[in-house]
Image (cartoon, rainbow, N blue to C red):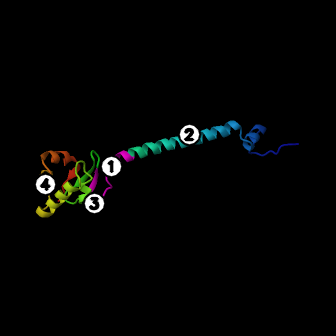
Amino acid sequence: MEKPTSDRFSSDHEFESFSHPSVSTIERTDIQRLSMIISALVIMTCSAKWFMSRNDRTPAVRGSVAMDSQTGFKVDVNRASVDELSLLPQVGPKLAASIVSEREQRGKFLTINDLDRASGVGPERVAQLGPLLEISD
């Protein structure tokens, strides 16, 4: 019996390899897929670990919180809420409330050093927080 011929297949070998993929072709395809899946899982795992390590330091960008290329984020002390100020290292809700209260009672901070007006904020704390803060008009 004669095999069908067409212009598409120039030899019996091409016809057979098209109709019935060899085991090595299937295995190679499966290995490539498995390799891609493993690569994707590794990338996702590394990304998740990186994100989780930054999650407790970097807040969502909101009105008084802005991203900064060197420090990660900056908080505007003249617009920040108690919750936003509490995102800063070594600033808990009590100190954040003191800063907001001082701002509401005596007006906006004109410089970062003006933060020492708030109870619980001294020169050392101002120096520590300075790179993470900004002052709006």
Q: Amino acid at mark 3?
A: Gly
Mark 2 lies on a secondary structure that is helix
Mark 4 lies on a secondary structure that is loop
| Residue identified by numbered label 4 | 119
Mark 1 lies on a secondary structure that is loop
**For discs 1 and 3, the disc positioned in front in the rendered view:** 1
Q: Earlier in the sequence, mark 4 or mark 2?
A: 2
Task: Name the residue rendered at 16%, 48% in the picture.
Answer: 126
| Residue identified by numbered label 1 | 56
Is 63 included in the stretch rendered in magenta? yes
Q: Which residues are magenta?
A: 51-67
Q: Amino acid at mark 2?
A: Ser
**For discs 1 and 4, the disc positioned in front in the rendered view:** 4
Q: Earlier in the sequence, mark 1 or mark 2?
A: 2
Residue 12 image-quadrant placement = top right
Residue 64 visible, this angle: no
Of 79 and 29, nearer the camera is 79
**For discs 4 and 2, the disc positioned in front in the rendered view:** 4
Q: Is residue 108 left or right of residue 25?
A: left
Q: Amino acid at mark 1?
A: Asp
The residue lying furthest to the bottom in this view is 105
Q: Amino acid at mark 4?
A: Ser
Q: Earlier in the sequence, mark 1 or mark 4?
A: 1
Of 8 and 127, nearer the camera is 127
